[in-house]
Image: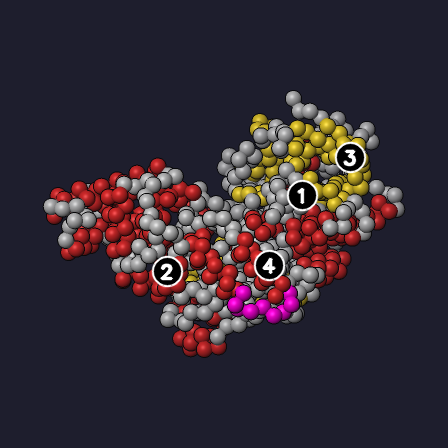
Amino acid sequence: MFQIQRSAPVADVVIIGSGAGGGTATKVLVDLGLHVTLIEAGPMLHPETDFKEHKWPYDYPHRGAGDGGASYFGHGRDFGWFSAHAGGWQLDGEPYTVAQGSQFRWFRSRIVGGRTNHYGRISLRYADYDLKPYSRDGIGTDWPITYDEISPYYDKAEKFIGITGSREGIRSAPDGQFQPCPPPRVHEVLIQKASQRLGIPCIPNRLAVITQPTNGRPACHYCGECGRGCISASNYSSAQVQVFPAMKTGRVNLITNAMARELITDSEGKVTAVSYIDKATRTERQVKCRTVILAASCCESTRLLLNSKAPRHATGLGNSSGVVGRYLTDNTGFGLGASIPALHGLQRYDSDGMGGAHLYMPWWLWDKKTDFPRGYHIEIGGGYGMPGIGTFAGLAGREEGYGEPLKKKIYDDYGTHVSFAGRGEMIPNADTYCEIDNTVVDRWGIPVLKFHFKWTDAELKQVAHMEQTFTSIIETMGGKVTASTRPVEQKISTGGEIIHEVGSIRMGDDPKTSALNKYCQSHDVKNVFVADAAPFVSNPDKNPTLTICALAWRTAEYMAEEMRKGNV
Amino acid sequence: MSEGINRRALLGQIAAATLAGNIGIAEAQHVHHEAVAQAKTTGVYQPKALTHHEFETLRVLSETIVPGATKGGAAEFVDVLADKNAELLAIYTGGLAWIDLTMKRDHGADFLSAKPEDRARMLDQIAYRRNETPDLAPGVRFFVWARRLTVDAYYSSAAGIKELGFMGNGARKDFTVPQDAIDYAVKRSGL
């Protein structure tokens, strides 16, 4: 049996999860003078020893293939040996289930900073029309907020985090508070020229990387390995940029290895404590609180609400509307690449730059008619990346022979490839949602999530359009694409795979059709707030992290004011 | 390999220098030169999973697949992995044994003692999938593994990375792209 331990002090705020939302809320609340108890399911992050920045493959006897060459047998570390994440598509002892006929992949990180340690750092504002999709095309639901309401919080988040970019005046990609973006690499210049010829804007990328010293953080040193984590904190991770500085105030009580289990409510239905499992001892503990912010990630926060059942709320806390778990979406994903003849014989140069592309293409047909609703943006890749395990796997498998001819092919091929990845908007549908699987519990006895997922014609047509576009760009650059005969259902990413899950605790003005109000405060339980991507009403063609930060900032300010007024 | 305290100190210097706006390439180069120095092994490698004969056969085979692979530690790489992976070990012991047996059958000597032209005759057959007859299939299939891991081993080694001309993994104050590189590619693309 679990030993129940109660710690006497009552925290002003308990924040569950230390990623983009939890980190931002922590920073904002601490700046406002509040005391925060921050619960994180994983261990403490130690950038200097945890991050493999600047490491070479040969610094490890296995070179990055993992012990026993795990990557050759399909069970290497997700995203490669050097990635800064601490988690994966599967976590030992923490299963999730997927309904028959559905496919869904769920990436979870268990570490201070969560998925911000390794994410792509693409930081795009939602456009004004993104927030009013129903008003625009009659599909989906409008957000309860306008662009003008969220814009000041984009400003705050961008200024504090540091985002590269340029002012372009494109409606689908609103400008923000930008730091200079480094110049395009050679292959990016070609992509930009080809795109321009096709009428596709290709503009400086908007990455959470600082190119100027910011708040005591040194500027980027252009090693190109943001995904490994940055020891000098020159890119955004909530751990280094928000949580650690906030801890220096002495107003943060960080509890690591604490898996939130349930929100405890009193007879009036208000949350009085958060119950969590201390992983080290496998004992249940509770931390009393005046307010709670869920920032455990879209689906984990959903799971926590659905698992917080009591006679007053038998379908889960804050779920009188029944929408919790519904309206889940991911972004669509599709990729295509090719070797570009114009890059053959190019001189070697240090193409590292920021960890990510220096250009991207925002959605450009927002005012044109297409055979699918909404749109997508395009991310690009290429350059002389650090060679390592698998760099030439395709070539070594495709080309045959051996000896100097093989070496020459490899030398000539290196750095000639470009790649394109589309990320587009998925429309919420009735067949895509998550719920509690009452038949399965994790290693701490907590019921797990079961996912239902379905792409519709809207997403499939969008991905077909991506393929045509990428093919056109590659061909305009002089490359060749071998047309794939696979059906589009096999070309589109698997649900969850883009790791842009949003929407399963959506906000809205009407408590009957939404779980949260426009400040991401529970309609039903006034001292419960949500600060991850779960409140999102739609999933526009922009990576969600910047919007998570902006909304978390707004929610934290609102909550602090409500607490000051004595309303919560 | 453990995190060198010097490397950590140098990374700190990079951070401080970048903050002050006066980073030198020297600091950056120190970091990876030191990593290179750390990677250099001392003494002769003693195989852990493969026998000495298997290891030497693999070394010669790897060197043939990718000239320079010995310098890149290709046989050591396979041995280190196979030491912790029975499936991979079986692929290699089986593949190397097949090569020896077939060499003896066809040329009267195992791979190591065979004449270089006989070795080449064998490899010219198994290095191409189109030769996958029932007789040669085990060799052809093993060669796919051998080529893949040899390529990976060499191009993840200091020697292979240097040969490719990779110039990154350093620290720079500014990111710039050589204009003549851009001109070269743009001209060739016709864009």
Badges 4 and 2: C-beta atoms under 8 Å apart? no
The percent coordinates of residue A158 (x first, y second) are 69, 60
Question: Which residue has dot 2 on it?
Answer: B159
Q: Is residue B24 magenta?
A: yes
- State the extent of the magenta-drawn residues as a range: B18-27
Disc 4 chain ID:
B
Residue B184 image offset from top left, x and y in percent: 42, 76
In the picture of the structure, the residue carrying the numbered disc 1 is A17
Disc 4 marks which residue? B12
- With respect to residue A563, does A205 lie above or below? below
Left or right: B76 as drawn, with respect to A7: left
Q: Earlier in the sequence, mark 4 or mark 2?
A: 4
Residue in view at x 48 percent, y 67 percent: A350
Picture residue at 69% right of the left edge, 50% below the top: A243
**A452 and B126: which is toward the camera:** B126
Label 3, on which residue?
A: A288
Q: Is residue A122 visible?
A: no
For disc 2, the chain is: B
Amino acid type, mark 1: Gly
Callout 4, which amino acid?
Gly
* Quarter of the picture holding the C terminus of chain A: top right
Q: Badges 1 and 2: C-beta atoms under 8 Å apart?
A: no
Find out whether residue A505 is within the magenta segment: no
Q: Nearer the viewer, residue A203 or A280?
A: A280
